[in-house]
Image (cartoon, helix red, strand yellow):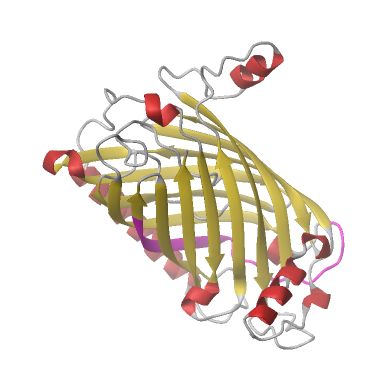
Amino acid sequence: MSRLRVTFAAIGLGMLLAAGGAFAQPTTTDSSASTARARSAPVFTMYFENDMFTGTDQHYSNGLKFSWLSADLTDWGQTGWRKNVVESLPFVNRPGGQKNLGLAFGQNIYTPSNIGIANPDPDDRPYAGWSYVELAFVSKTQDVSDTLALQIGVVGPHSLAEDSQRIVHRAINSVRPRGWDYQLRDEIGVSVVYERRWRLYGRALYNALGIDLVPHAGVSLGNVQTYANGGGTLRLGFNLPSDFGVQLARPGAIGGSPTDDLDPRVALNRNFSLFVFGAADGRAIARDIFLDGNTFRHSRSVDKENFVADLSAGVGLVAGPWQLTYTQVWRTREFKTQRGDYNNFGSVTLSRAF
């Protein structure tokens, strides 16, 4: 059944791609648009993901991430080693391109289906926490974006995930999680992530109504998660932001900054946007520490599925420099003894351009 759902996800992605090709104009973004204000706008983003939006409390239970993406550093006026460092980074020699540095920190919490028992079912997902910092470099034009990110953090008790969940559950008078004694052991985690995103774009109705397709492909390497992924996002609405689409709080997601001055977050005469979107992402997974268990120490573990897909849909609103989005995510079975064919959770992002 899980393989069948992955197949349906791939078919859905193909439909997204076909739809984008049908509506997009032969050219991509408007390369004649000014970029002066977009280049000077750093963006702060908060991601909050939780399965409470779907009335459950299991598996991927919570994700919280804060990110800061700098303004364009192409002409930042520095000399010496600082200028040499930026110019030595990859993907920098694109005419008219922008370069941004990002910094983020976050925490993910994973739990079994029944958090009320002291000794969790060994065939269920083990308790695990992941707290990390992330450094990212983004090189983009109006048509393509490359992100290279490094995540460093800790899995296990020192991630403080147990404390976070206990405090929140106590505050909202929810079920006390009792099985954290069986969580994964402490382990330093490192992941190197690369992702490329393309933007195929069309505008109609006085440059207000728009549709864009943002395919993506990437890879993650490390002892935390090793996978290759690909998918796409289709957006439709008024005054679409000129970025590369809504992302979940996953590795390499560092916030979306404007690529040109038509973006309603920086435009002089259009400061409102309302849009809907649908997305698909598929991952071929070689390692997932949250299912496979610790790398060098004995811990709880389950047999993971090697192919996992996400289907999602949502709505976004831009008002002045602020952008708010909500995404509903359906994720196929992640391990072989998982009950049910999929998980679902909600994702909220709130960002501000400065």
Magenta region: which residues?
296-316
Query: In which image quadrant can residue 330 be found?
Result: bottom left
Q: Position of residue 115 (x, y in %)?
A: 69, 83
Query: In which image quadrant can residue 314 be found?
Result: bottom left
Query: In which image quadrant can residue 198 be found?
Result: top left
In this rendering, would 144 be left or right of 68? left
Q: Is residue 303 visible?
A: no
Q: Against 175, is 345 above or below?
A: above
Q: Position of residue 180 (x, y in %)?
A: 78, 76
Q: Against 58, is 205 above or below?
A: above
In this rendering, would 316 be left or right of 181? left
Furthest residue in direction bottom, as rendered:
117
Residue drawn at x 20%, y 32% as measured from the top left:
26
Front residue of 270/230: it is 270
Q: Position of residue 322 (x, y in %)?
A: 41, 49
* Residue 272 is covered by the magenta coloring: no
Front residue of 31/165: it is 165
Q: Is residue 231 visible?
A: yes
Q: Position of residue 307 (x, y in %)?
A: 54, 60
Q: Against 60, is 130 above or below?
A: above
Front residue of 107/182: it is 107
* Residue 311 is covered by the magenta coloring: yes
Furthest residue in direction left, as rendered:
205
Front residue of 152/47: it is 47
Q: Against 8, is 84 above or below?
A: above
In this rendering, would 64 be left or right of 327? right
Residue drawn at x 13%, y 39% as measured from the top left:
206
Residue drawn at x 38%, y 24% as measured from the top left:
36
Furthest residue in direction right, as rendered:
297
Q: Total marks drawn?
A: 0
